[in-house]
Image: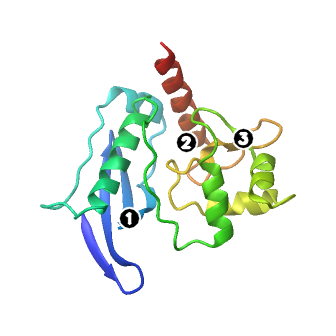
């Protein structure tokens, strides 16, 4: 964990999470998570590895940030751990979208309305966000999502049912959707 002081935002904390063999870098402010990205290439068969390897989270520093940052860090750890073990997360982490445009923040907030394990079309999101016929704009705004996986832009697909693009790769998008479907089936049984 690395603490960074910034003049305009305040204290930021950088945390590395180990989820199976995948490392994620995250940046937190006192308001919530600001960024989350995989560090390095993603494994080809993520689904099998996530199910086979216990999830562990490592915080690389003695001591832990004061609240509310400590809570935000634990929430993201819990969410990732549950998702990558095909379990529906029982919480939504707190986000800090303060560095984004109002339009991008609105689109990402609306993306959170897509139920876990389901998908919606770019058209649906354009209508909900008040950007009629703005499919390409929506795609660009989702492509700039600073917290993919947590703000589920992977649940947005084309109107014809095709998967569409994804910043972390189409295969990873398919894997995330499959993990969510498995979690729902697991919950039902």
Residue 65 lies, with reference to residue 184, above or below; the image says below
- Measured in 3D between alpha carbons, the distance from the residue under mark 1 to the one under mark 2, in whole angstroms, is 21 Å
What percent of the width, then of the height, locates residue 73? 32, 55
Look at 51% across and 16% down and name the residue there.
Answer: 188
Q: Is residue 138 left or right of residue 1?
A: right
Q: Residues within 10 Å of mark 3 (few under 14, many from 20)?
A: some
Look at 81% across and 48% down and name the residue there.
Answer: 123
Residue 178 lies, with reference to residue 4, above or below; the image says above
Look at 68% across and 49% down and name the residue there.
Answer: 165
Residue 56: which quarter of the image?
Answer: top left
Quadrant in which the N terminus is drawn:
bottom left
Look at mark 1 in the image and give the residue it sits on: 27
Look at mark 3 in the image and give the residue it sits on: 120
Tally of numbered tags:
3
Q: Residue furthest top?
A: 189
**Does the CB distance between marks 1 and 3 fall below 8 Å?**
no
What secondary structure is found at the residue carrying circle 3? strand
Q: Is residue 78 left or right of residue 163?
A: left
Q: Residue furthest right?
A: 133
Q: Is residue 157 left or right of residue 21?
A: right
Q: Residue furthest left?
A: 62
**Does the CB distance between marks 1 and 2 fall below 8 Å?**
no
Q: Is residue 69 left or right of residue 88?
A: left
- Measured in 3D between alpha carbons, the distance from the residue under mark 3 to the one under mark 2, in whole angstroms, is 17 Å
């Amino acid at each position: 964990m690395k603490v960074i002081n910034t003049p305009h935002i305040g204290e930021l904390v950088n945390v590395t999470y180990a989820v199976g063999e995948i490392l994620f870098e995250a940046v937190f402010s006192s308001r919530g998570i600001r960024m989350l990205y995989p560090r390095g290439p993603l494994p080809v068969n993520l689904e099998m590895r996530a199910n086979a390897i216990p999830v562990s989270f490592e915080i690389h520093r003695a001591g832990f940030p004061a609240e509310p940052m400590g809570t935000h860090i634990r929430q993201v750890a819990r969410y990732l751990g549950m998702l990558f073990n095909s379990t529906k997360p029982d919480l939504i982490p707190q986000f800090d979208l303060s560095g984004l445009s109002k339009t991008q923040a609105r689109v990402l907030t609306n993306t959170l309305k897509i139920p876990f394990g389901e998908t919606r079309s770019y058209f649906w999101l354009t209508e909900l966000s008040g950007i009629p016929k703005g499919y390409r704009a929506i795609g660009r705004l989702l492509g700039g999502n600073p917290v993919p996986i947590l703000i589920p832009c992977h649940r947005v697909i084309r109107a014809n049912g095709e998967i569409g693009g994804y910043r972390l790769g189409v295969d990873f998008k398919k894997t995330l959707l499959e993990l969510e479907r498995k979690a729902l089936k697991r919950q039902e049984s």
